[in-house]
Amino acid sequence: MKRIGFIGVGTMGEPMAANLLKAGFEVVIMGHRNPAPVERLIAAGAQKVNTPAEVAAQTEVVMLCLPNDAVVEEIVLGPDGVLAGGREGLIIVDTSTISPLTSQRLAKAAAQKGMTLLDAPLSGGQTGAIAGTLAIMVGGPEEAFHKVKPVLEAVGKSITYVGPNGSALVVKLGNNLIVAAEAVAIAEALTIAKKAGIDTGLVHRILSGATARSWILEEKVAASILKGDLKPGFKLSLMHKDVGLAVDFAKAQGVPVFVTALIYQLYTQALGLGKGDLDSIGICELYTEATGVDLKAQG
């Protein structure tokens, strides 16, 4: 499989499509609301078409990297969608984070047309997308997974088959609810420390070597909160969406999620205060604005 379609060349999708080109794949992309990444990818060798159906008609694998359930449904099922243009045997690799239930429904629709949909959510953020080191978890028919694994290896480093359709998304939602919980806990801990007069840089160094250490604490906080730089690698609005999906799916499974439900409310509040375009770690502003402290490290 050498000819790959890519729909959704935004923050994550552009570097992923670029890495496919670097790996020697032919890449067909669809126009994007922001023309800049499209132009850069065309300059790197990609071919542009105008509809999802055209992407599907010209490729063997179509990768999706889209923001939410509604957009994925329109791209896959719409009158000019992937299923309308794809041939029998097409494999759709959806890297979007959506509801497992939505993904299962789309997989059934694809199967009725002789196509296969895999849910393949990502972890690693924009940094991992650029470096080609994303963690990718995959749900769906295992035979299709093995067929597209070389494609996934061009954009990711840790690639794991999970099980049937929707199962990878269940794991991804678990990942993001943990990350969101960490972000809230870190924001509270740093705000308490700063309010007590302790430099957040010092707190960060201590906690990074203590039992609280994590990737979010060691890497994300150092690159964002401590520098006063909350430009998005993964937008707060998207984290709000993902935590909401986790709450909804837990409800469907009959699982109580006491802490996750509270975290969802905090992200809802931050979204309502206009913070959706900040990085997801920007939840810290709920605390800095409430207390008047600045979490940037000294020196």
Image (cartoon, rainbow, N blue to C red):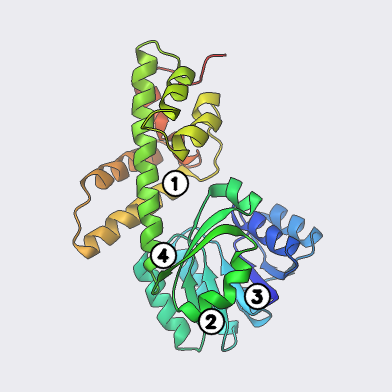
Residue 206, relative to residue 186: is it above or below? above
Are there few (<14), some (14-19), or many (20+) residues within 10 Å of tag 2?
many
Depth order, front residue of 271/2: 2
Res 83 label: 2
Provide the secondary structure element on which disc 1 rests. Answer: helix
**Residue at (45% x, 43% y) in the render:** 236
Instruction: Tell me if mark 4 has few (under 14), some (14-19) or many (20+) residues whose alpha carbon lies within 10 angstroms of its own.
Output: many
Q: Which residue is mark 3?
A: 55
Q: Determine whether the residue tagged by mark 2 lies in a helix, strand or loop.
A: helix
Q: Position of residue 165 (x, y in %)?
A: 40, 73
Element type at mark 4: helix
Is the residue under label 4 in contact with that under label 2 (CB below 8 Å)? Answer: no
Work out how far the residue at label 2 is from the one at label 4, CA to CA, in angstroms: 22 Å
Residue at position x 59%, y 62% in the image: 8
Which-is-in-front pick, marks 2 and 4? 4
Q: Which residue is mark 4?
A: 168
CB atoms at circles 1 and 4 under 8 Å apart? no
172 left or right, relative to 4:
left
The amino acid sitting under disc 3 is Val
Residue 133 on image: x %, y %: 59, 53
Q: CA distance from mark 1 to mark 2?
A: 29 Å
- Quadrant containing the C terminus is top right
Instruction: Please report whichever mark, 1 or 2, sits nearer to the chain's N-terminal start.
Output: 2
> Which residue in the protein does label 1 denote?
237
Q: In terms of sequence position, does the residue under pointer 1 or pointer 4 come before the other?
A: 4
Indicate the position of residue 289 as horizontal and vertical percent values: 39, 23
